[in-house]
Amino acid sequence: MAEIASAVILIIIGYFFGCFSTGYIVGRLSGHDIRSEGSGNIGTTNALRTMGAKGGALTFGGDLLKAFIPTLLVRFAYCPHMDYSPEMTYFMTLLVGLGVVIGHNFPFYLKFKGGKGIAVSAAVIVASSSNSATGWIMIGVGLLIFIVVVAITRYVSLGSLIVVWFFPVYTVLEYRASGLFVYMMAVSVLFTALAYFKHAGNIKRLLNGTERKLGEKK
């Protein structure tokens, strides 16, 4: 029961961290309402398109930071304090990270219309899986795949949709023998499902050839 209560609390804490909508705040400070420009999304890609390199970098950095803070605190402070096993630590880190992604995607004060969660998911990937050689190898491979796919196709959405499979693949490779595997896998698949749900429009445009490419003017 204590673990269940902790899990719920961590998801809630993560949610409120995720609700710090960096792109929206950076836009407001620079005289933009990013929700009414470009794709209308408050994430890094639209911030880059509508506010340039500086706005995109600030948005990306802020989104990484709001995910790194709670996930790393859980991994390096909370879980050691609770004397959790490596498996439980990974699971709890995933849970608070999932909360961050949900908050980023569905911030309550923006009528639950947020970003698509790729930058914050990337931060959760690093925070949760960088405790093993397998994790570091997969992080490197995932980054390389993303760069190559975007460089060749210029579709950021396509690279994102491929890389977000990191969660279930890493969980299978690293924790398939764990007693918590089923729960870990369920949360891992949720990360991927959320990304595909938020990219539904991008997927449709990719299929019919109308998806905007990186650097392409509207």
Image (cartoon, grey):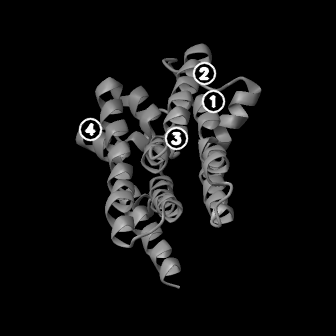
Q: Earlier in the sequence, mark 4 or mark 3?
A: 4
Left of 210 or right of it: where is 127?
A: left
Which of pointers 1 and 2 indicates the residue nearer the eye?
2
Lateral position of residue 204 relative to residue 36, left or right = right
Residue under label 3: 135
Pointer 1 and pointer 2: residues touching (CB < 8 Å)?
A: yes
| Nearest to N terminus: mark 4 or mark 2 | 4
Mark number displayed over residue 158: 1
Cβ atoms under marks 4 and 3 closer than 8 Å: no
Q: Is the residue marked by circle 3 packed among few (<14), some (14-19), or many (20+) residues within 10 Å?
A: many
Residue 210 is situated, as x and y percent measured from the top left of the image, at 68, 25
The residue tagged with tag 3: helix, strand or loop? helix
Task: Choose top left, top right, bottom left or bottom right for residue 63.
Answer: top left
Q: CA distance from mark 3 to mark 2?
A: 21 Å
Task: Label 4: state its secondary structure.
Answer: loop
Cα distance, mark 4 to mark 2? 33 Å
Judging by the rendered image, the residue that carries numbered circle 2 is: 149
Residue that numbered label 4 is attached to? 31
Against 41, residue 157 (above or below) is: above
Above or below — where is 178 with respect to 211? below
Amino acid type for the residue under numbered disc 4: Gly
> Where residue 76 is drawn, which disc sits there?
none
Residue 11 in the image, given as x and y percentages of width and height: 47, 67
Side of 22 where 123 appears, left or right: right
Q: Amino acid at mark 2?
A: Val
Tell us which disc is closer to us: 3 or 2. Answer: 3
